[in-house]
Amino acid sequence: MTKREVNELLTQTGPGTPMGDLFRRYWIPALLASELPEPECPPVRVKLLSERMLAFRDSENRLGLIDEFCAHRGVSLWFGRNEEKGLRCPYHGWKYDVNGNCMEVPSEPAESGFCEKIKLKSYPLIERGGVLWTYMGPPEEQPPFPEYEFAMVPPEQTYMSKRIQECNWLQAMEGGIDSSHVSFLHSGALNRDPLFKGAKGNQYNLSDYQVKFEVVESDGGLLIGARRNAENGNYYWRITQYVMPCFTMIPPRGDHPVHGHFWVPIDDENCWAWSYDYHPVRALTTEERTAMEEGHGIHVKTIPGTFRPVQNKDNDYLMDRAAQKAGIHYSGIAGIGIQDASLQESMGPIVDRTKENLVSTDNGIIMARHRLRKAALALRDKHVQPPGREVEQQRVRSASLVLPPDAAFKDAAKEALIAREGVPQTSV
């Protein structure tokens, strides 16, 4: 059982909170690069870690992430004009550059020096792997740019989507490291979804519900091993990577692309679910990319012009009781991504973990909470930087493989768990 004060520490990420300070020590996804497609395109509202900001690409193609509101009288700069190296407030013409510096106050003489006294809060924004990343922590503690494999392979080998999830980031992330639910919640999809079907590993998922978990700490987070029975007394292992604070990598299936998530807090009751797919050694096929765009696999079809899923709590996720009864969809809800979201949102905006009754298959979740709490308190009390910031800790892979019963999965799969250019994933 998780104590109430621990639950609050883990779920609150606003400015000045221990978990908020921890998140602010990492580069986190802020926008798809396609949301700011060209110089002087319209600005985009961004809310992360309970902070309201505005992202824009200026006339010189520089990226900026600044406070949403003008320092004059608090007008939202979303209404601003993106022109001539800056963003101009339409109310009284105050103008800001990508670093939040005030460039011009038309009502004040230039020689007065008034502009030099005005600066909006700003954060760096960089582009990598089709994603715009930001770092919201102390500048002097900025880590190296992120090097997760999906962001480093050529563009034709990777795909990224995002959606809004209407619950706290932690209960969403915990679903990403819970391998035991696959045999139930996603059972109808394993042999139907075009991004999952045909893999030998599906048979092991569907034939052994008594999954055994072994969880060990890695340099950047956790290795979560889920063991099921295979032929000849061997074991089928699915090894999930969790890199702090919110990166998860799902074990692959056959030659299908590798995939996973970032779970990034918008505020304490909503999060961004970022979903990536990539293949380490080949381009995604036209069929694979089309399936991702249509909301198959871990991706979700969203309402045009928004990032809210078409299936959402207002329409009961388009649940089909007949499909549930027939076993087409175990929960009656179509789509792997929204199957997860529907149940995680059903817990409420922030689940009360004091009421849980955890079992052995929850060991990954238990250890993730422990690592997060320990790291947040070490940062707060001892100024120790948390795990997962270094690029070596991000160059990882998940894996699925069959091992003999006497093999320790961490040792036997050691090479498979490292991202290496030109080497395919280890998968069953």
Image: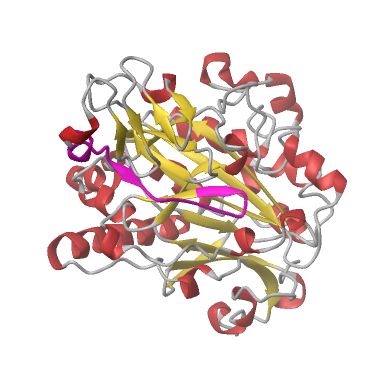
Count up the numbered dots: 0
Residue lying farthest to the left in this orientation: 381
Give the residue at x 37% y 29%. 349
Q: Give coordinates of residue 405: x percent, y percent.
A: 63, 80
Give the residue at x 68% y 52%. 277
- Is residue 77 rendered to the left or right of residue 198? left
- Is residue 381 rendered to the left or right of residue 292? left
For the C terminus, the quadrant is: bottom right
- Residue 275 versus residue 202 in the image, above or below: above
Q: Give coordinates of residue 229: x percent, y percent.
A: 67, 67
**424 or 192: nearer the eye?**
424
Give the residue at x 56% y 84%. 411
Residue 1 visible in the current orientation: no
What sort of colour scheme is used for the picture?
A: secondary structure
Q: Is-magenta flag for residue 124?
A: yes
**Which residues make up the magenta segment?**
114-132
The quarter holding residue 149 reads bottom right
**129 or 175: nearer the eye?**
129
Q: Is-magenta flag for residue 59?
A: no
Residue 166 visible in the current orientation: yes
Q: Give coordinates of residue 8: x percent, y percent.
A: 23, 42
- Is residue 33 rendered to the left or right of residue 286? left
- Is residue 419 rendered to the left or right of residue 60? right
- Residue 387 versus residue 204 in the image, above or below: below
**20 or 416: nearer the eye?**
20
Q: Give coordinates of residue 200: x percent, y percent.
A: 80, 61
